[in-house]
Image (tube, rainbow, N blue to C red):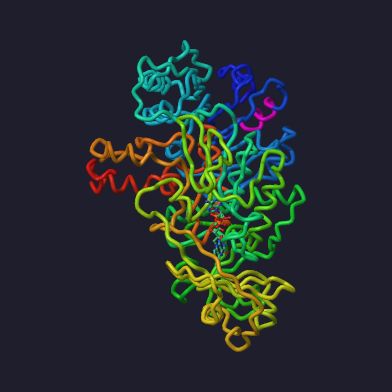
Amino acid sequence: MTESLLFAPHDLPVRWRHERIFTFVDTTFSAFLPLWQRWRDDEARCERLHVVAIAQPNALNEPPSADDPSPLAAELARAWPMRVPGVHRLEFDDGRVVLTLAIGDDVHEMLAKLWLRADAFHLDAPDDPRKLCKTLARFAGDGATVCANASPAHRPTLRRALASSGFDCSPDATDAPLVACFAPRWRVRRHEPPLRCDASAREAIVIGAGLAGCAVSSRLAARGWHITLIDRHAVSARDASGNPAGVFHPIVWRDDSVAARLTRAAFLYALRRWRALEDANHELHRSGAGLLQIADTAEDADALAAAIARFAYPSDYVQAMTRADASRIAGVDVARGGWFFPRGGAISPAAVCAAQIDDASARITARMNTEVTRIEHDGRIWRAFDASGGEIASAPVIVLANAHDAARLAGLYGEPTRSVRGQLTVLDSCALDPLRMPVIGEGYAVPLGAGGTLVGATYDIDDPDRAIREAGHRENIGRVAGMLPDLALMPGTVRAGRVAFRCVTSDRMPVIGQLADEHAARRDARELSGAWPLDLPRIPGLYGAFAFGSRGLVWATLAAELIASLVEGEPWPIERELAEAIDPARFLLKALRHGEISPASCG
Ligand SMILES: Cc1cc2nc3c(=O)[nH]c(=O)nc-3n(C[C@H](O)[C@H](O)[C@H](O)COP(=O)(O)OP(=O)(O)OC[C@H]3O[C@@H](n4cnc5c(N)ncnc54)[C@H](O)[C@@H]3O)c2cc1C
């Protein structure tokens, strides 16, 4: 494709000039490098260029070669994602150029799973384009342009389909792609595609300086927002995020469930952000030898080996391991086979939090030793207050990243979160001294070098006891010995322990996104009984990032990127179905659908 065919139909670069964001959707996966180059060369470029490219998995087989004429090809090659399905978000030029790469077997089906507002579409049209054109109409921003390749035989069908979806087609020229512009005579779509939140200034309050709040602060700051980050402790990462180390890895299971897909996207995104922090000289204490998962039973090990082969996962993502292979790479005997994540490992949650704050320090004002007891909205501005009624901060956007206290501050109905006590044990010299990498399964063991071996963790639902218990240490050692049997023979001595509390929901998925206006939804319960998530009334400027359960390390960064994308009206970094699985409104929606809420019950 010549560059004039890429830019002229969309009137680029003129249309992106002085815009905050410009979103270009490309189903040919050929536009990114020329667009990026053009954006770089244009001094009046938009603040943030989003290219959303949709492709089949084999598009990831090879990164751009060293012979590629574009000087940016090497940069893209360095960020090249693993060959796994789902949405990959890659950032360049300090995050001002974003490539969202959606990988699926059927390109048009994959496109339909996203959620975004597009300014331009660059397409290879299928023979029957009707469904595709409806998708374009769902995503098109005002005046969005389409440039579509279609064979001469299929051009008339494409013109008709575009026209009936609200696009005005340019006069036909059979030797050029078909060009059209979104100009619907009337509005028929049920949901408007994402729009930036209505904020008078790019200022936000984030409550909670654990993994959730530090990640949200970092992703908003990267978009030019100024953050007031509030925590009741003197420093960040003192509660659940204060453990000496935590493990991170994707979930691989027999089916590619929503949890597995979400965790995969989150894992890959976290790796990219952590690498960016490390490249900026932040020490995250990240282990580098991979992570081993031991199956609960020999049958599970076999089933997972079959699933890994069936999904054709690449070896840099996951590898099936026999017991002998697993013992060899672990450096200690393991009880069963399992699977190995070469890019998984352990990391210091507190170091991740500190690095995120430090990296964005020019845009973050930390208000530590400060407890928020109440928040209030006057229709335009959010205010956070302390126990004496003093105002701590005000801003048009507020993000609740304060785990167990988030539901109370938001005034959510019911009790959507619960607390799960977890006790960790640090062992002195023991049978696991030769362990070369973190091992997970029934429990987990993380080598801390001279710091001993971390084993854990208990899972005590609704147990508020902060005291460290001997029984908890025994439980941890017993659980880990079930997968690393030598530990039973030589458990060593307990050097230290720590208790913290996971915040969980009933479906064990986190709560990420804009909060629903539960009061309004309850009042309109009858009309909303068949509602979709996008139908629900939402509270302007109020977002949540909490209930990360046992996976805060993996989930927090992508969660933050999703929230920043919602706030800015940018393409979502995951499929809509996945975002709906973590939508704060999902419990309300279920209750509305099941008729469990009647207008009379609202109080
Ligand atoms: C024993 C144990 C082991 C774990 N192991 C792992 C692991 O290996 N891998 C992994 O990924 N995850 C693990 N987790 C889970 C992980 O630690 C959590 O998911 C993560 O830390 C949650 O981060 P958060 O920011 O949501 O919450 P927190 O870290 O608890 O942060 C919430 C913050 O909000 C502040 N706050 C609350 N209310 C207010 C208020 N009203 N005003 C001001 N500040 C407020 C608190 O002071 C706190 O700093 C483990 C958890 C436990 C308990």
Residue at 42% x, 18% y is 167
Residue 518 in the figure: left or right of residue 394: left
Q: In the picture, residue 257 is in which quadrant? A: bottom left
Considering the whole magenta stretch, tell me its main secondary structure. helix
Picture layout, residue 405 above or below residue 163:
below
Instruction: Single out the residue that lies furthest toward the bottom.
Output: 489
Quadrant containing the C terminus in the rendered view: top left
Q: In the picture, residue 495 is in which quadrant? A: bottom right
Give the magenta range.
31-39
Instruction: Single out the residue that lies furthest toward the top.
Output: 171
Q: Is residue 34 magenta?
A: yes
Q: Position of residue 127 (x, y in %)?
A: 41, 29
Picture layout, residue 242 above or below residue 141:
below
Q: Position of residue 533 (x, y in %)?
A: 37, 40
- Say which of 233 and 422 sits in front: 233
Q: On the rendering, which quadrant does ligand 1 occupy? A: bottom right
Residue 468 in the figure: left or right of residue 462: right
Picture layout, residue 149 above or below residue 493:
above
Q: Position of residue 153 (x, y in %)?
A: 42, 22
| Residue 83 appears in the figure | no
Residue 218 in the figure: left or right of residue 143: right
How many labels sit on residues?
0
- Say which of 516 and 489 sits in front: 516
Instruction: Single out the residue that lies furthest toward the right.
Output: 281
Quadrant containing the N terminus in the rendered view: top right
Q: Position of residue 467 (x, y in %)?
A: 54, 73
Residue at 35% x, 17% y is 186
Residue 534 in the figure: left or right of residue 68: left
| Residue 535 appears in the figure | yes
Q: Is residue 26 magenta?
A: no
